[in-house]
Amino acid sequence: MERITRREFLRCMAAGLGALTAGELLAACGRGATITPTHLPPPVLVPPAETEIAASSPEPSSTTPPEYPDLVVARGGEPRELVRQALERLGGIGRFVHNGDDVIVKPNICVAYNTYEYAATTNPWVVAALVELCWEAGAGRVRVMDNPFGGTAEEAYARSGIQDQVVAAGGEMEVMAGYKFVMTDVPQGLDLGQCAVYGDVLSADVVIDVPIAKHHSLARLTLGMKNLMGVIARREMIHANLGQRIADLTSLIHPALTVVDAVRILMAGGPTGGNLADVRQLDTVIASADIVAADSYATTLFGLLPDDLDYIRAGAAMGLGRSDLANLKIEEIALGA
């Protein structure tokens, strides 16, 4: 309703003396009435036709959410295509990465000693494929990083071959600056109460874990859960009660997606390797939203069972994922078939 001044109101009072209602009074002022006169009968409300009701009421959805495999294993192709096919069967990268997301991809780039052929570091083309997929999903930023213990990060990034492939795919290689490690509580930790974690990993929208499957002299195998040790400082503190503390760390980071590189696996001499006789080429990639499930399947590549690794047992016990392979929905695809 348009407002009137006090002077106009008094003028209208004189002009509209004798008006029975506020509506008539305002009409005397030349204003549109918004109140129904009390001396008129109330309006009759006519219910809308059934067809109008049907048109305005949304139909109940008959679609059900799609069911995805718990885990996908792709074999027999080039690394890039193995990743793409595995992710497609898992529901697509769009399940994990959305428009504008800040994504961190965490491969294993532990040392600067050898090239990727020695299977101590993640296959460069596996990492590059994930960077490409993230961009295709509309990511706002895609960074790749690790905290090597042998050689500098710059040396390890270059020697592994990962830097060249990531840059070619449009991603960033980030050297993990010491000042960005932040002492952080581990709320679900059963033995690890605090650790210094790289802050950007905690604040990223999406973390993708991309370990290489390899032998480890202390943990038996390095897989997805153990690969997360690369996002903390003073990793030696994890070595006491290693299995439980790796599981505790996983409860804090818990990647959205784990892609295990088993293109080449290191059967002995880990974690640094150095002997090509210890390398076995499998041309395989394992992908899952469940890091415990991914690690559990990867143990079978070495003739082991999930319960053979302390950190898998601890992670399953904490409810971080599933290790009961017999009850998981596993899809295996052969690219060469």
Image (tube, rainbow, N blue to C red):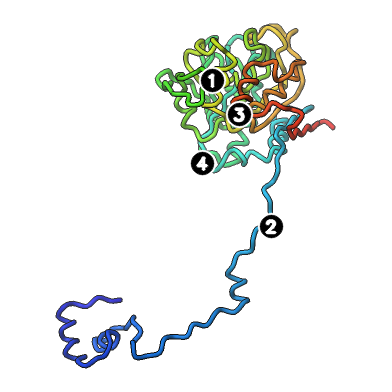
Q: Nearer the viewer, mark 3 or mark 2?
A: 3
Give coordinates of residue 196: x percent, y percent: 45, 19
Q: Is residue 140 above or below residue 155?
A: below
Q: Do callouts 4 and 3 mark residues in contact (Cβ within 8 Å)?
A: no
What distance separates the C-alpha of mark 4 from that of mark 2?
31 Å
Does 62 appear above or below 188?
A: below
- Residue that numbered label 4 is attached to: 100
Between circles 4 and 2, the one closer to the viewer is 2
Of the numbered discs in the image, which one, if any, rests on residue 300?
none
Front-most of 80 and 55? 55
Task: Please state which amino acid type lies under the numbered disc 3.
Answer: Gly
Sooner in the amino-acid sequence: mark 4 or mark 1: 4
Residue contact at pointers 1 and 3, CB within 8 angstroms: no
Mark sitting on residue 319: 3
Label 4 CA crowd tier, 10 Å (few <14, some 14–19, many 20+): few
Image x and y of residue 289, in percent: 64, 33
The crowding category of the residue bearing disc 3, from other C-alpha atoms within 10 Å (few below 14, some 14 to 19, many at least 20), is few
Query: Of callouts 1 and 3, which one flags the residue occurring earlier in the amino acid sequence?
Result: 1
Label 3 or label 2, whichever comes before in sequence order:
2
Q: Give the residue type that dot 2 points to.
A: Ser
For label 1, the residue is 146
Q: Quick check: 124 above or below 42?
A: above
Instruction: Say what secondary structure mark 2 lies in.
Output: loop
Amino acid type of the residue tagged 1 in the rendering: Asp
Are the residues flagged by discs 4 and 2 in contact, CB closer than 8 Å? no
Residue in the picture at 59% in, 79% down: 49
User: How many residues crowd mark 2 within 10 Å: few (<14), some (14–19), many (20+)?
Assistant: few
Task: Indicate the quadrant containing the N terminus: top left, top right, bottom left or bottom right.
Answer: bottom left
Residue shown at 47% from the left, 26% from the top: 187
* C-alpha gap between disc 4 and disc 1: 23 Å
